[in-house]
């Protein structure tokens, strides 16, 4: 006949006492009284028929048997915690480029938190191809030109409108009456999309002669910063400069044209039906297009 197992409460009380070398600290960790911890350990010693602690006025040290038991319990409790974490739903992780994160997500995400204060989000700045499980990503914002994971659920977000922007000071100092005059301006570009100027020329139908690029930057957010400080004209997605246009930090003298890309949402099938995923999906698919429409209405 097998011996009955000790209670989990008693085992936790003993392991915490040995780890802290203190019943008082163990009681604080477990939110019980010192007396309750002492009784649990006494009962454990009685059940096992072995002394587990050497008790004295100054310390509570484990016996050799107590050390052996405490080490095994510590390993077991960590394994239990790890197993729970593996199956417990993780917070959603939203992945997007650093430029989208800095120029759109961060300025707008407080609206989502106000609507859903109970939903925890984590963020991943990445604009490459991903594996949802390997990279621990739940939802990703990507360009339509990037191949999605084979298991991705796809949602359309918005067309990407692109156009040349500059600072008001640069425009005043370098008056340009027509888009074709941009050939005489300082043109800025980004290494992540060196074809941006050609995309805009094709989309807008402007007969602009090829002009040398004055400076190139690694990311759109650096390119936008450079344009804001008067270094020249930069072709950027309108989505990334909404606040700059509204505040007057940047101007878009020739407006924006619909570029060859679209912004899309990839959703991991493993989290697609979760309420927090559905809430984030709904917010992104509604808010991104709405923010672009408001920007158009504000200039009409």
Image: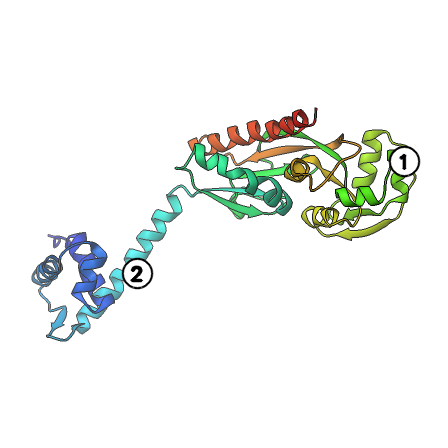
**Residue 78 position within the rendered picture, expressed as x and y whole percent measured from the top left:** 32, 57
Closer to the chain start, of discs 2 and 1, is 2
> Where is residue 103, by image quadrant?
top right
Horizontal placement of 112 versus 44: left or right? right
Q: Disc 2 versus disc 1: distance between alpha carbons?
A: 71 Å
Query: Residue 9 has which mark?
Result: none
Report the residue marked by disc 1: 180
Between 218 and 229, the one nearer to me in the picture:
229
Colour convention: rainbow
> Where is residue 295, by image quadrant?
top right
Horizontal placement of 39 versus 66: left or right? left
Q: Residue at x 83, y 38 (%)?
A: 198
Q: Secondary structure at mark 1?
A: helix
> Where is residue 210, by image quadrant?
top right
- Classed neighbour count for the residue bearing mark 1: other residues with Cα under 10 Å, few (<14), some (14–19), many (≥20): few
Q: Residue at x 77, y 48 (%)?
A: 230
Query: Residue 75 has which mark?
Result: 2
Q: Residue at x 45, y 30 (%)?
A: 273
Horizontal placement of 174 versus 53: left or right? right
**Residue 135 position within the rendered picture, expressed as x and y whole percent measured from the top left:** 54, 47
- Asked whether the viewer can see residue 148, the reply is no
Above or below for 245 versus 186: above
Q: Secondary structure at mark 2?
A: helix
Between 204 and 276, the one nearer to me in the picture:
204
Between 222 and 166, the one nearer to me in the picture:
166
Horizontal placement of 171 versus 35: left or right? right
């Amino acid at each position: 006949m097998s011996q009955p197992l000790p209670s989990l409460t008693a085992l936790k009380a003993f392991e915490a006492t040995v780890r802290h070398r203190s019943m008082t600290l163990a009681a604080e960790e477990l939110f019980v009284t010192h007396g309750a911890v002492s009784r649990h350990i006494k009962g454990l010693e009685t059940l096992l028929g072995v002394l587990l602690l050497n008790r004295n006025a100054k310390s509570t040290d484990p016996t050799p048997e107590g050390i052996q038991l405490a080490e095994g319990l510590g390993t077991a409790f960590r394994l239990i915690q790890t197993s729970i974490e593996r199956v417990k739903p993780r917070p959603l992780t939203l992945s997007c480029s650093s430029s989208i994160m800095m120029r759109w997500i961060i300025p707008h995400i407080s609206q989502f938190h106000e609507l859903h204060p109970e939903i925890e989000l984590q963020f991943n700045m990445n604009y490459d191809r991903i594996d949802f499980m390997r990279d621990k990503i739940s939802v990703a914002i990507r360009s339509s030109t990037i191949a999605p994971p084979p298991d991705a659920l796809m949602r359309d977000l918005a067309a990407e409108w692109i156009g040349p922007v500059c600072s008001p000071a640069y425009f005043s100092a370098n008056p340009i009456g027509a888009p074709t005059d941009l050939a005489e301006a300082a043109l800025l570009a980004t290494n992540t999309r060196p074809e941006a100027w050609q995309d805009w020329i094709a989309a807008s139908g402007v007969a602009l002669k090829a002009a040398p690029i004055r400076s190139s930057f690694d990311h759109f957010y650096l390119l936008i910063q450079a344009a804001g400080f008067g270094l020249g004209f930069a072709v950027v997605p309108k989505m990334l400069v909404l606040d700059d246009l509204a505040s007057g930090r940047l101007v878009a003298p020739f407006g924006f044209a619909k570029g060859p890309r679209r912004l899309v949402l990839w959703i991991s099938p493993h989290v697609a039906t979760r309420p927090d995923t559905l809430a984030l999906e709904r917010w992104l698919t509604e808010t991104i297009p709405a923010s672009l429409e408001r920007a158009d209405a504000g200039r009409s």
